[in-house]
Amino acid sequence: MPPRITPLTDPEITPSSRRLAWLASDADGVPLGSAFLRLFTKAGQEHLAEIEIAVHPDERQQGVGGLLLDAAVAAARSEGRRSLVAQAGDGSPGDRFLAARGFHRVLALTYARLPLPDVDLARINGIVQHPHPGYELTHWDGAVPPALARTFADSRRAMDDMPMEDTDYGTVGWDVERVRSVADAVAKRGELLHTVAVVDRSDGSIAGFSELVVPGDGRGDGQHYGTGVLPEHRGHGLGLWMKAESIRQARVRHPELGGLLTDTADSNAPMLRINDALGYLPTHRAVEYQLTL
């Protein structure tokens, strides 16, 4: 008897997306696998959906993943989506499954970790203290201060030309409401959002930013959310400067934190150089796949 695919109600709704879910089970109701379909809802991304499928290792090669994918693809089409993206570990069963089901590779990613206890803090301090004429560092915890909210939202366009190769990701629009909603979402999870930014002294505007999310208890690993510099301010070493300050603060403020995690597109050579210079060590590679609906 083929697996039974049951649609589920997923309560996860965020300001930028909502999710649909399915459970695959056998004749006795034993779970075999699951699928989650994220439907992006913000302007500029209404064409996009993201799928995550998990099948128990003992149940693979039995058609369970295919049935879950069929259900998700049908739902994405009914929602008027144009592109469906998925991620898998390079060379993993998921990698082979997506390729066999008509997805094509659009992006390669390198995941890396910085072991904080091994950080040469004197060297990091040297990078932070190196002068950058015309610029100064600032930072805040949680939501952006009101005085910087508008210019911070404007600075998010620094990520618009982030290398995404052939991914049909769209253009994400940012305003003050959205940057605050991101901070609220992190706080509701019980995590800490730390932001380092560079200010252009000529007009007080933000030229770039680097975000780090840390577990609420200050243990385990922190996760870099994004580091970007506006095009008109690139070429001055601001990305390295901000990320070094983020490391310095994490090391000093969270002495029990184990490390910092980051992921970078293989085509993003400038950020890969920054990570290498700061001591991040590659942990694994992943591949982004895309299916045109």
Image (spheres, grey):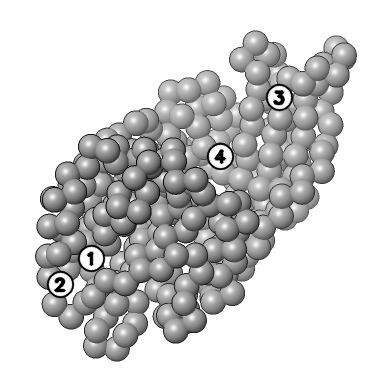
Q: Nearer the viewer, mark 1 or mark 4?
A: 1
First-in-chain label (2 vs 3):
3
The correct choice, above or below, for 216 with respect to 151 in the image is above
In three-dimensional space, the C-alpha distance between marks 3 and 1, rounded to whole angstroms, equals 45 Å
For marks 2 and 1 on the same chain, the one whose residue lies earlier in the sequence: 2
Amino acid type at circle 2 is His
Residue to which mark 4 is pinned: 86
Q: Quadrant of the N terminus?
A: top right
Q: Quadrant of residue 257?
A: top left
Spatial separation of the CA atoms under disc 1 and disc 4: 32 Å
Q: Badge 1: how crowded within 10 Å, few (<14), some, or many (20+)?
A: many
Please give the name of the residue rendered at 52% of the width and 21% of the height, measured from the top-left corner: 93
Q: Are marks 2 and 1 in contact (CB under 8 Å)?
A: yes
Q: Where is residue 8 shown, x and y percent of the image? A: 82, 38
**Which residue was labeled with disc 2?**
132
Residue 52 spot, x, y in % from top left: 62, 36
Q: Circles 2 and 3: CB distance less than 8 Å?
A: no
Circle 4 SS class: strand
- Residue indicated by mark 3: 33
Which one is in front, 80 or 234? 234
Of the residues tagged 3 and 1, which is closer to the observer?
1
- The reply to whether callout 3 and callout 1 are in contact (CB within 8 Å) is no
Q: Which residue is mark 1?
A: 238
Q: Is residue 293 left or right of residue 79?
A: left
The image shows residue 17, relative to residue 38, as above or below, that is below
Kindly report the distance in space between the C-alpha atoms of the residues bearing marks 2 and 1: 8 Å
Along the line of sight, the residue nearer the viewer: 210 or 70: 210
